[in-house]
Amino acid sequence: MPVTVGSKRVLLHSPEKGWTVEPAVLHIDGTQIKSIKTYPNAEQITATSHWFGDDLVTPGFVDSHTHLALNFMRGGIAAQQLSGNLVEDLFFKMEEKITAADVSAFTRMGAYECLLSGTTYVWDHYYHADAVADSMVQVGLTGTVAATLQDLSGPGKEDWEAGLTFTQALNGSAYHKQLGIDAALGPHATDTVSEDLWRKLIDLSEKLNLPIHCHVAQSPEEFQRSQAQYGCTPVDFLRRVGALDCSSDKLLVHMIYASQKDFSYCQTDSVRLVACPHSQMIFHFPAAFSDWWRADLNWSVGTDCAASNDSLRVQAEMRTMATWPMNSLGLSPEYNEFRRSASAIQAQGMSALRQSILREPLMNPTEQTLLNVLFLGNAKRKTTHPRVTGLSGGSFANLLVWNWDDPVFWPGQSPLHSLIYADIQPALKGIMTLGKWRGLVGDVRRSVVNSSEYKAARREATERLNQLLDRVGLK
Ligand SMILES: [Zn+2]
């Protein structure tokens, strides 16, 4: 049965006006928004089935790179810093022993965590992707699922053919499409996938119009292996093999060991560089985001995973990115010089440098660009999915309701700014995906965490983690 959701403050997007907050009513039919009607004055709105008055209604957030199941290693990276080579000794060991049922149980927990932070659409990448897709359906999270494909090394080395078969089956599955799950090709990285397999995947992506979602230039080892094997950088390898020129969308995640020349190969909107700032600060160090912006590249944000980030809140990643430009000042040679021999003249020079960064338009993404990233997963506004287009006709009925009375929005003059820069999480009061409320509106977190479905999911995940630790010999 069609429902209507209305408020005095609905976050809308149009090519003419960009992102605006206006009185509006959404007409929802099944899993999709059918149409939207705006009003110059909220008093003109008559009966709606769900009226939220002053509250802010927005689309859900898009997380452009995650591994939902990896929460089973939460805190693991921090432990690595204490004990040396935990990645090889523990991570790979555990991932080699992990079963589809384990991935299913851990993904459910990750999907709940995502949803409760306001993320309604994810780009996931993991082994046993069939289990990932099914768990997302069970929790009500929508997204694009990539089976991790690797034929040279890594825990999925023996399973890439099954992963590829599943990717094609998922792409043709009307059942999953209807439930908001689509497929992407998921080559793991440039050093774990052979040139032959890369070529095969690029051909397939062209033929089936499937996005390519991969890690690129994420470690010095990957960089060194690329130099040794191909005599070029990982990004240049992707260019030579034809990945950057193919017509499908490409999500290149991390891009830490990428040069300015590499960035010049990425100047097409179908290439999206994905920033995961908090994860990168823990597993390695942050990529040169300022260079991405200076080169005017398309980009988006992801959380990566709880193993390296400890959080799946993509809006927190956005907050970090939005305040990023001034980091370059703190790391500049000028500031280094100031610390070495502080003087009033140098302090003045730092102030001038700050002003010059503020005046560089590309170095300071606008609010509109940041909202594109947060709600569409794409800085350049062209949506990457026909049904993830914000609150508009034809889009998934994925939306969030925010308590306007919460102090995080007060005095209420700049809701767009608050959505980017404030810690708005405490004000989240309603979550809808695919036209269904998840938990109770007004009591969303408590009602989900107290539900029998969540309790059963948590119990199963705990049991399976204990059994996995047993199998690996860690209990
Ligand atoms: Zn990742």
Image (cartoon, rainbow, N blue to C red):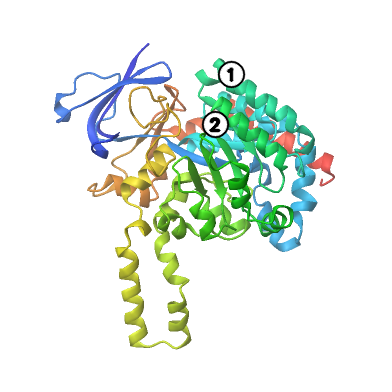
Dot 1: element: loop
Q: Position of residue 111 (x, y in %)?
A: 56, 34
Residue 172 got which mark?
A: 1
222 sits to left or right of 25: right
Residue drawn at point x = 25 percent, y = 48 percent: 414
State the residue position of label 2.
144
Characterize the local packing of mark 2: few (<14), some (14-19) or many (20 or more) Cα atoms within 10 angstroms. many
| Comes first in the chain, label 1 or label 2 | 2
Vertical placement of 286 versus 91: above or below? below
334 sits to left or right of 6: right
The reply to whether residue 81 is in sight is yes
Vertical placement of 304 versus 353: above or below? above
Vertical placement of 188 versus 204: above or below? below
Depth-wise, is mark 1 or mark 2 nearer the camera? 1
The reply to whether residue 452 is in sight is no
Q: Amino acid at mark 1?
A: Gly
Q: How many marks?
A: 2
Q: Position of residue 320 (x, y in %)?
A: 44, 55
Residue 128 got which mark?
A: none
Quick one: 228 or 215, which is closer to the camera? Answer: 228
